[in-house]
Image (cartoon, rainbow, N blue to C red):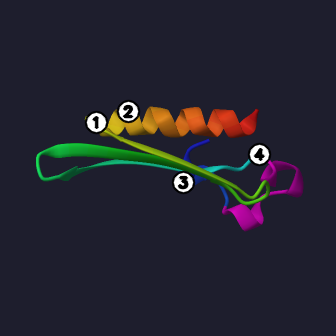
Amino acid sequence: MHAEDTPPHNKLPANEKQYALCTDGSCYIVGKHRRWKAAVWSATQEVTEATKGEGELRQFAKVKEIQLALDIAE
């Protein structure tokens, strides 16, 4: 599902809430350096994971957020 097709977390059926993860990945520039950060949050599992680094593009941060989400989902 696309985000715009998905109901808000509080409207999901109980059996689907356990699988809902919120993700974000971004890249920003500080001086001449690119920095990225990726994060995942699960309301039902009360889990938050984040990682960050330097020198990569936003696409790298998006891949890292997916990797974090898959690690939590296991």
Q: What element carries label 3?
A: helix
Q: What element carries label 2?
A: helix
Q: Where is residue 21? Give x, y as percent.
A: 66, 49
Nearer-N-terminus badge (3/4) = 3
Residue at the limit of the structure toward the bottom, as seen here:
10
Could you classify mark 4 by the number of other residues whose Cα lies within 10 Å: few (under 14), some (14-19), or many (20 or more)?
Answer: few
Q: Name the residue that disc number 1 marks.
A: 57
What type is the residue that disc 1 sits on?
Answer: Leu
The answer to whether residue 21 is left or right of residue 16 is left
Circles 4 and 1: CB atoms closer than 8 Å:
no
Q: Which residue is drawn at 25% across and 35% down?
A: 55
Q: Give the CA distance from mark 3 to mark 1.
A: 25 Å
* Residue 16 among magenta residues: yes
Looking at the rendering, the stretch of residues picked out in magenta corresponds to 8-18
Could you classify mark 1 by the number of other residues whose Cα lies within 10 Å: few (under 14), some (14-19), or many (20 or more)?
Answer: some
Q: Name the residue that disc number 2 marks.
A: 60
Q: Name the residue that disc number 4 marks.
A: 19
Q: Which of 51 and 45 is in front in this view?
A: 51
Q: Which of 21 and 68 is in front in this view?
A: 68
Q: Nearer the viewer, residue 60 or 2?
A: 60
What type is the residue that disc 4 sits on?
Answer: Tyr
The answer to whether residue 34 is left or right of residue 13 is left
Circles 2 and 1: CB atoms closer than 8 Å:
yes
Q: Give the CA distance from mark 2 to mark 1.
A: 5 Å
* Residue 37 among magenta residues: no
Q: Residue 4 carries which label?
A: 3
Nearer the viewer's eye, disc 4 or disc 2?
2
Nearer the viewer's eye, disc 2 or disc 3?
2
